[in-house]
Image (cartoon, coloured by chain):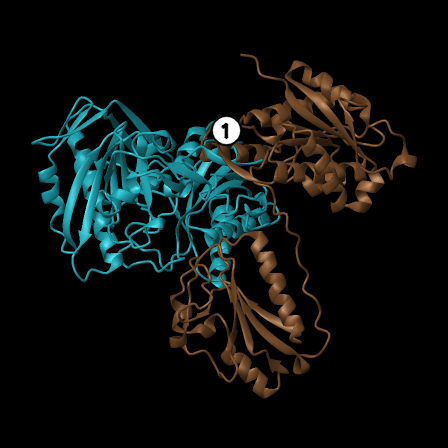
Amino acid sequence: MTRAPLRVVCYLNQFFGQLGGEDKAGVGPQTMEGAVGAARAVQQALGDEGRVVRTVVCGDNYAAEQGERAVIELLALVAAARPELVVAGPAFLAGRYGVACGALCAAVQAHLEIPAVSGMHAENPGVDLYRRQVHIVPTGAEATRMLQDARRLVALGLKLVRGEALGAPAVEGYFPQGVTRNVVAAASAAERATAMLLDKLAGRPFASEVPRPAFPPVPAPRLAKTLEGATIALVTDGGLVPRGNPDGIEALNATRYGAYSIEGKPGLEPAQYDNPHRGYDTSWVKQDPHRLVPVDVARELEQSGAIGKLHETVYSTVGVATTLAHSARMGREIAEQLRAAGVDAVILTST
Amino acid sequence: MRLELRWFAVDAVDPASATRLGGTRLEIDLAALQRVLAADPRLARMRLDCVHPGERCRIGRVFDVVAPRAKLDGGQDFPGVLGPVVRAGNGRTLALAGVAVVLTDQQAESVGALAVIDMAGPNAARSAFGATHNVVISAWPAPGTERSDYLAAVRLAGLKTAVYLARAAREAEADHVEAFALPPSPRVPAELAHLPRVAYVFQVHSHQRPTGLDEGILYGDPVRRMLPTIVHPNEVLDGAVLRGFMGRSATTWAIQHHPVIRALYAQHGRTLWFAGVVVTVAQATEPERVRSALLTAGLVAHALGADGAVFTKIGGGAPHVDMAQAAAQCEALGVKTTLIVEDMSTDGSADGMLLFDFPGVDALVNVGSSHEPLTLPPLDRVVGADDLAARLGAETRATYGTLCGAIEQVGATRVMAEVR
């Protein structure tokens, strides 16, 4: 039984869609029957496997200026053609075009639930913005190898349509999406570590299996006033919670934090607190919560005038196996609340 | 120091009226074994099961796995835990291949922290213990027994069983003999003096949870205040180091077959000179961590005179950073390092794989993500977890971390997390 050719929609900008150059960059979404302009390379790469049923074109400026609205309009045009695969670009080093390709592919995957692929040069801003969601094939800076590039996009797109398991980005030819997947290596970790060490010792190149963390160092801001006039807050990721854990902060992989009043309290009574943290031995903190959140000493400093005021709310979460995304969000929310409350500085205790 | 592991391949295990090894068939007198184990007042009752590769069976509540080993001519099996502290790593030791002693934990309420072993289906191939004949020990605590005492009793039963089984090979002819001989560290023959000297830094325990008094880890010591110290690699291979009671992706079995020590032995005298092993503990507080890292680097660089070092860790996130701090101190002293890490991300994003970023600590091998989902298909029989049989026998969503032996933090396994 022969399968009907795959229905493919191509997305191009005004230039590759042959509407014109920069003078036509304001043109809104258009749809054309069959393969037009650069989409002909996609059709050639598809051969008998599929048919470019429609080419959707939009001006670079329109896409950039209208943003989400342009995506919604383009998505409707794409959907009307009932495709099984969308090929956007390749956009090479064209920034506005690359961003539009990435945005449309992400929207197609999310709303039409079909695969979409694009192609770009590594320095196209669309790569950083969309490589996590969209399979983007690395291309040159310019359209000098259009057919070869189109073939690579199509080969990857066909694999996605068929639901075939994709290999590593370097093998399959797409920008890493920043997700991890367990695979089986040829040798044990111990053998690989020994071989890597011998390479490192001999000054030979070696490939670390873990990328360095992407998060940048955060410089501590300077306190603009003297400590005697400052309001200081206590914040911890060591897991201190009131007994009963009223906010249900998770024992690991936390997504929540709590704000707990210490108003009128000279210190923290052990019987009133608990600690669900699963990442360290909490026995000592349960015995005396001040080992984690030093309200006792901070009150002394407040009374002696060494600090202006102790903030009456303690923020606490469980920092163990917490995702970077949740950490960043909780940190931002806590910082916003502290700033709104007029807090000048924070003592952050970790474990 | 010269250790001989005398290997006996076993491909059938059967209950019988006497314990003996006939060819590759191990017959076990389970009643006699049970009598050997019965004397422990911390245990109320015990059951022994034998399960086999290919059997549609799942072992639940897995706590640890021990390889059958017994000293042949004197010496002490699992010194400091089963008997007095006698040096391990010298002489002849009987070792059965194809058989494992699986310990279960009948007390843990948070069974999510425990693991399973599948004897059939796709997960059997993901763990070394899906291919071994397993003697499963299920023991229930006597009333009033503290958790740590219960686990110590279960482990003691496992170690006794490992010795009991291996002793069945006393009269038999070994299939092959593996010799591990390493002279004292400074004695390098002149013709091999050009080889880079490589040490192994073995983090044997993490103090993230309270460590029990009977939680013997190094020659029976619970390593509560242990500072880094040097041991001969043979001591590790021969029962001086046991896994503690926190079992995250690590088994005593893997330590008895230590993959890093074997890998370094395999290259010893060829591409490197194996300079020795430093055992360390992941500390609970920052001052202890800094002190431990400092002393570790001193032993590696100044005492062993190593040019390079391989590091592994045990436990979770704090030990991962602890290991890296020690490696950074080594790099600062000019010792090149490679580290075996877990993928620490809990949401599958590459951003969270690593919890440190130190200068020079740039050569990392990973043992995969224990958080990656995995399906446990339905199997006919559940052993070691009667109370969970209905749930565990059915199809269940699990993770690599809950399949015992799928990921070994000491580097025995081939699973790795690849950035996609």
Q: Residue furthest front?
A: A80
Q: Is residue A173 left or right of residue B269?
A: right
- Provide residue B415's location: percent of width, then percent of height: 45, 34
Q: Residue at x 22, y 49 (%)?
A: B154
Picture layout, residue B111 above or below residue A283: above
Chain A's colour is brown
From the image, tell me which residue sits under label 1. B271
Mark yes or no: residue B365 visible.
yes
Res. B239 visible in picture: no
Q: Is residue B343 left or right of residue B403?
A: right
Residue that extends furthest to the top in the rendered view of this protein: A1
Q: Residue A235 at what x, y percent from top left?
A: 55, 69
Question: Could you say which is closer to the camera, residue B177 or residue A36?
Answer: A36
Pointer 1 indicates a residue of which chain? B
Instruction: Give B325 or B314, whichever is nearer the viewer.
Output: B314
Amino acid type for the residue under numbered disc 1: Thr
Query: What percent of the width, then of the height, locates residue A72?
Result: 72, 42
Instruction: Name, please, the residue furthest toward the left.
Output: B17
Total number of numbered discs in the rendering: 1
> Chain B rendered in what hue?
cyan
Residue under the point 84% across and 32% down: A14
Residue A79 horizontal/vertical position (percent):
67, 34
Q: Quadrant of residue A46?
A: top right
Q: Secondary structure at mark 1?
A: loop
Residue in the image at 48% along x and 54% along y = A253
